[in-house]
Amino acid sequence: MKITIAFVLLLTFSIASLAQAPQSDLQQFIRVSSNVVALTHVRLIDGTGAAPVEDQTILIVDGKITEIRPSSAYYVKEGIKTLDLNGYTVLPGLVGMHDHMFFPMGGTPPMYSNMGFSFPRLYLALGVTTIRTTGSVQPYLDLEIKKLIDDGRMIGPKIHITAPYLEGEGSFTPVMHTLKDANDARKMVNYWADQGATSFKAYMNITRDELRAAVEEAHRRGLKVTGHLCSIGFREAAEIGIDNLEHGIFPDSEFVPNTQPDKCPGAAVNQTLRTLDINSEPVKETIRTLVAKHVALTSTLPVFEASAPLASAQAGPTSIGAPSAVLNQRMLNVMNNEARVRYLTARSRIAVNSPQTELVRKSMDFEHAFVAAGGLLIAGLDPTGNGGVIAGFGDLREVELLVEAGFTPLEAIKIATFNGAKFLGEDSRIGSIAVGKQADLMIVKGNPAAKIMDIENVEIVFKDGVGYDSEKLIQSVQGLVGIR
């Protein structure tokens, strides 16, 4: 792997600029910093799917939850930092399972660049306390950002690093390495595992031999492989041993007639999806195979909604294409002017009769059927597409769209918290609220169990017991998405 002097200098400069903020400057974003914190009179949604419990007190000691009991049965001792949260709800921090550090920059062919300053702050500000990057275009930078966050020199979520894409011949963007063969796939897995990557992502043009080699090598090292596939159908990937598949049913090419082995049929995948009966026996067989092989499915509905026509003014706020979501002013404000214009221009070109809304609904139905059959659904946002999906904002929108898909608010919250932690093998530490777990929590005004839109009212986010001011973090990156 050839690394130029210019690349090393650029990477060194980028990392230095990210790390230059002194510790005192980071303190301004911390709202609660105490070894012992009591959250009193708060509604508790624990992330397991259980019903909310009213008027609870949660005691946090040295970053962990040590007590949960009714506020009426708890006496707050003098000297303990106490927050009266009457009217608020506490939820587990979201576990974003398709949360890139990069963002589309436009151009032909399309290019992407890391948002190493703005995205970590936005993820944390909006309640995402753990992410899996699920594909990297600047892996060294991702690894260094993780170190800076772990060392307390940057603000951001806990990060599980996914290596650069495992892509075959025919990539649509030059930011991806093209695999030469199965042996090259093995080399990539081992190289990036040695660097600190903890998962891998197969992409649209990978061959069966290359995928099999990557899965075998990753599993040998106790690591997992996910995939945004096209050249390989879901059932065949499951038989090969893949652990996870991305984007609901959108990339599944197995229903396209007359496909060639190891070849992505391109636009025919979406065309076939338009006429596909989600309740048909072939689709049910795919679901049964995924469940039997313990393949998790990642829902990334926001990235597809961003290309859907605007919903009517009479549509509800969780409807696909709701103006309050795809034209969210708070989200638009964090973009720089070029990124904002690029996205709004792309939106202006979406035909009112575009089939995208129908396709999103079909993926929703597939995801719902997958869960009903016993499958593990996890959630992320995927900040790519036409540039209308932004770190943090998209994660919250994903939860709302899961409710639009037919899940209850409590089920949707579980998918976005506990299920992700379970897939990562972290569910004994994070993903739900229980005594002994890390205090990774989001405090929102209102009751998302009754009104899922209340999940947007994030005010404080705790990571390991430290409470960060959501609005201050958002304000600190105004106009920066698209720059850094």
Image (cartoon, grey):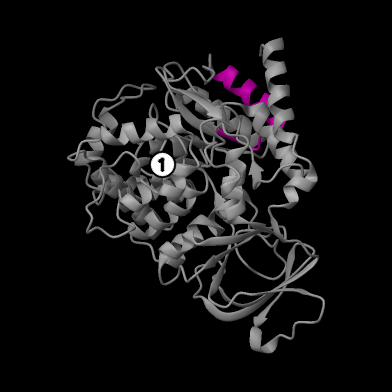
Q: Residues within 10 Å of mark 1 (few under 14, many from 20)?
A: many
Query: Quadrant of the image for the N terminus?
Result: top right
What is the x, y in percent for residue 397?
43, 52
Horizontal side, residue 80 vs residue 322: left or right:
right
Q: Is residue 395 above or below residue 268?
A: below
Residue 88 locus on image (x, y percent): 55, 72
Residue drawn at x 65%, y 33% is 142
Determine the image quadrant of residue 170. Answer: top left
Q: Which quadrant: the C terminus?
A: top right
Majority secondary structure of magenta residues = helix
Q: Is residue 105 visible?
A: yes
184 within the magenta span: yes
Mark 1 falls on what kind of element? loop
Q: What's the residue type where badge 1 is placed?
A: His
Residue 138 is inside the magenta segment: no
Count all numbered tags in the image, as a single digit: 1
Question: Residue pushed farthest bottom?
Answer: 72
Furthest residue in direction left, as rendered: 353
Q: Please identify the quarter of the rendering in which residue 184 is found.
A: top right
Residue 215, above or below 286: above
Quarter occupied by residue 213: top right
Q: Position of residue 307 (x, y in %)?
A: 32, 38
Is residue 386 in view? no
Report the span colored magenta.
Answer: 182-200
Task: Identify the residue shown where x is 74% and y is 64%.
Answer: 64
| Left or right placement of residue 78 versus residue 371 in this view | right
Q: Nearer the viewer, residue 192 or 17?
A: 17
Instruction: From the image, tell me which residue sits under label 1.
Output: 247
- Viewer-closest of 158 and 282: 158
Q: Where residue 228 sits: x, y (%)?
A: 44, 34
The residue shown at (23%, 55%) is 313
